[in-house]
Amino acid sequence: MTEAIAPEVHVMDVQTAYGIPLRVLAVPAGVAGPNRFRAPADRAYALVEFYDRRYPRCGAHGQFTGAYYDVPSVLDTRDGLNLHGGVQSWTVDAETMGAVRRWLSDLLDSGALDAPRPRG
């Protein structure tokens, strides 16, 4: 299954401490992600979307977990992140979230994403 994705979208694959392979997308403001969520052009930050790669039949990135966050909110997290309360395996542990935060910070530092930094 081929799925078009804007070239501005950044992709990171991780595996949680629970063994769940996830794909994380950083979608710039004003660009549509694979699920057509769109950060409006007048917003100053990108969105982060999470996909479960165990389900390739759902799309090229896997099954969308229903979880999308603005970059500053993800950078503000200090622990793990529960992506969907109804699916126990869709919990990202603190160590994996740390890797996601470092990746997003690198994208911001390189100018690949434009987003305000967290206040804390």
Image (cartoon, rainbow, N blue to C red):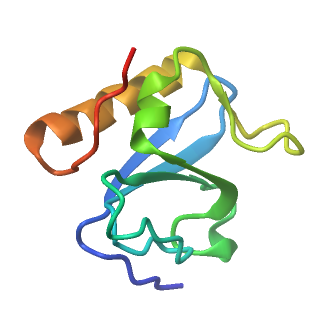
Residue 52: x %, y % from top left: 64, 53
Q: Which residue is drawn at 28% across and 38% down?
A: 116
Q: Which residue lies furthest to the right in this view?
A: 86
Q: Is residue 5 left or right of residue 94?
A: left
**Residue 14 visible (yes or no):** yes
Q: On the rendered image, what quadrant is the C terminus found in? A: top left
Q: Residue at x 38, y 28 (%)?
A: 101
Q: Is residue 32 left or right of residue 67?
A: left
Q: In this view, does 50 lie to the left or right of 44?
A: right
Q: In this view, does 92 lie to the left or right of 107?
A: right
Residue 64 lies in quadrant: bottom right
Q: Is residue 116 above or below residue 94?
A: below
Q: Which residue is drawn at 37% across and 21% down?
A: 119
Residue 79 lies in quadrant: top right
Residue 110: x %, y % from top left: 10, 41
**Residue 25 visible (yes or no):** no
Q: In this view, does 38 lie above or below 89?
A: below
Q: Which residue lies furthest to the front in this view?
A: 42
Q: Residue at x 68, y 75 (%)?
A: 57
Q: Is residue 30 above or below residue 115?
A: below
Residue 19: x %, y % from top left: 66, 32
Residue 59: x %, y % from top left: 59, 75
